[in-house]
Amino acid sequence: MSDKKIKSPASPKIRKFARELGINIDQVAGSERKGRIIESDIKNFISNKINQNLNLNENKEQKIEKEFKHSDFGEVEIKDVPRIKKLAAPYLVNAWKTIPHVTNHDEADITEMEDFRNSLTDIYTGEKKKITPLAIIIKDLIE
């Protein structure tokens, strides 16, 4: 006997549909003969999950409302969210969740480079030359 996992009965189209929605098809109960999964089963599964999440969110909001009122902290003004913000919100949330937000800081001692920059003068006129640190850094990186 092999230890292969038995796949839930569903057509390739339904498997693709579930995969696109990010659903594990093995969690969906099929309503057709021998537990075969159809599109409406997946839609019902999603609907049930959304309703469960809404109920959890409502419970959290009720708990927060019981803890304090916003007006306790000052005047409250309720405004409608502009259409552009409603459209942009899911994309911004997705970007925040998926894109790694990393900042890297390195320190370098550039006192010798600054001394060199300040000592640069024109050979013919003796005027001080002004060169940015970036020019020296790029030249060092190239060599």
Image (cartoon, rainbow, N blue to C red):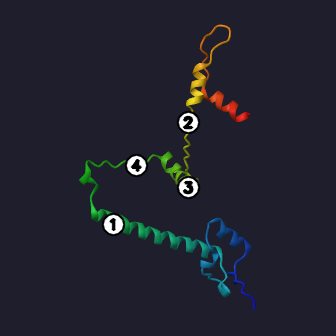
Marks 3 and 4, how far apart at CA: 22 Å
Residue occupying the point 71% across, 87% down: 3
Q: What amino acid does circle 3 point to?
A: Asn
**According to the image, label 4 marks what residue?**
80
Residue 91 vertical position relative to residue 122 in the rendered view, above or below: below
> Residue 54: horizontal and vertical position, in percent?
44, 67
Circles 1 and 4, Cβ within 8 Å, touching? The answer is: no
**Dot 1: within a 10 Å radius of its alpha carbon, few (fewer than 14), some, or many (20 or more) residues?**
few
Q: Mark 3 or mark 4, which is nearer to you?
A: 3
Q: Is residue 13 left or right of residue 95?
A: right
Q: Reading the chain from its start, which is encountered first: label 1 or label 4?
A: 1
Q: Reading the chain from its start, which is encountered first: label 3 or label 4?
A: 4
Q: Mark 2 or mark 3, which is nearer to you?
A: 2
> Residue 82: horizontal and vertical position, in percent?
45, 46
Q: What amino acid does circle 2 point to?
A: Asp
**According to the image, label 2 marks what residue?**
109
Q: Secondary structure at mark 4?
A: loop
**According to the image, label 1 marks what residue?**
62
- Compare residues 111 and 101 and report the one nearer the observer: 111
**According to the image, label 3 marks what residue?**
94
Q: What amino acid does circle 1 point to?
A: Gln
Residue occupying the point 28% across, 63% down: 67
Residue 5 vertical position relative to residue 53 in the rendered view, above or below: below
Q: Reading the chain from its start, which is encountered first: label 2 or label 3?
A: 3
